[in-house]
Structure formats: C-alpha cells, structure tokens
Amino acid sequence: MSHPGLGEWNIRDLAGHTSRSLITVETYLAVPMTSDPPTLRDPVAYYRATAATLAGAAAVVERGRQAGRDLGPDPVQTVQRLVDRVIAIVRDSPDDSILTTPFGTIGLLDYLPTRTFELTVHSLDLIRAAAVALPSQLDGAIDASLQLAARMAYESERGVPALLALTGRQQLPEGFSVV
C-alpha cells in the first residue's frame, strides 16, 4: 500500500487517517458524558472550532501515518472490525449523549455528521488513489456530505463562490475549501 494517497500520505496512511473518524467516535463515547449543554451547537460549529488545528497540519499528517501503521498486517480486516465495533457502540448510546472533544462538547447526533463527512470525503480520496469504481453504497453519504459542505460554505461566507461554481458560472478560487 505504498502507492500515493493524498498529499504526503500513501494509501495506508490515508486509510489510517480515515479510520480515525471511527476511532474518535469510539474514544469520545468511552469518556463519561457531561450533563452540561453542548458548547458546539451543530456540525458547522464543530468544524469552525477545529479550523485552528489546520495550522498544525504536520501533526495531522503524522497521526495519519501512525494510524496507518496501527492498521496492522490486514488493514481491511482491521477497519471492518472497527466499523462493526463503532456501529454497535453508537447503536447502544443514547441519542442525547453529549461528547467531550478537544474542541468543546457536542451532541452525538450533531457529531456523527462530521464523521460521515470525513469518512465520505476520505473514502473518495481512497477510491481515486486506488483507481477503483465508486460504490453505489456511498450515495446517501455523498448527499449528506454535500448538504453539510453547503452549510459550511454558507455559514463561512463562502456560499456565493460555492454556488456559482456548482452552477457552472465560475471556477472556485485557488485553495478554496469549506473546512
């Protein structure tokens, strides 16, 4: 899996980084819940709070590499076990659970769309890097991720260029991102 993945990551690193979307759910649900109201009101607020971490991109790159190494000799099986475990944990967790993250507290039902977004975007990165066909099972996740990306664009005052680009009226500016 030493084939190029994304940026500085190879495919294993990228798969490791992608798996962290599941690992954080498991980790945050293992921490005792707070009864205080969430400090982050929704997925967009969560992304705004995490924006400061983009400055620490080297740390993100290294965490992805370590997560890739942690996938062990059978990354596919390791990720499948992680998926099964996290789905069971989420299923058994109350919908009104409040999670403590490094960026603030957030309701479980508001945090999960951020994980769907990350899993979807990075799954698309993996699909491109591995040059495999897009599975139809991603349709719902792509829909949900597009909706969240549109909200992030709008709430960060990048809605106009995003809408104009999506409707073929202009190209996005260099380096444009909603995350």
Image (cartoon, rainbow, N blue to C red):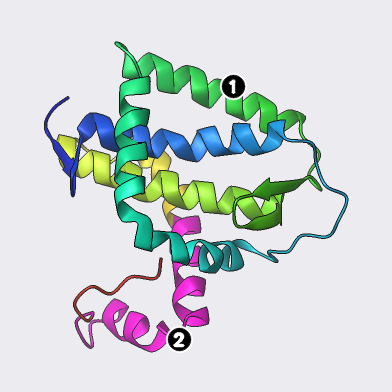
Q: Position of residue 122 (x, y in %)?
A: 34, 45
- Farthest left residue in view: 3
> Looking at the picture, does residue 73 appear above or below residue 147?
above
Does the segment drawn in magenta span residue 165?
yes
| SS class, disc 1 | helix
- Start and end of the magenta stretch? 143-172
The answer to whether one can see residue 131 in this image is no
Q: Residue furthest right?
A: 35
Q: Which residue is mark 1?
A: 85
Considering depth in this image, is 40 or 78 the residue closer to the camera?
Answer: 40
Earlier along the polypeptide chain: callout 1 or callout 2? Answer: 1
Q: Amino acid at mark 2?
A: Glu
**Percent position (x, y) of residue 38?**
76, 60
Quarter of the image for residue 132 reads top left
Depicted 164 relative to depicted 26: above or below = below
Residue 29 place in picture, x, y as percent: 69, 35
Front residue of 105/85: it is 105
Percent position of residue 2, x then y:
13, 27
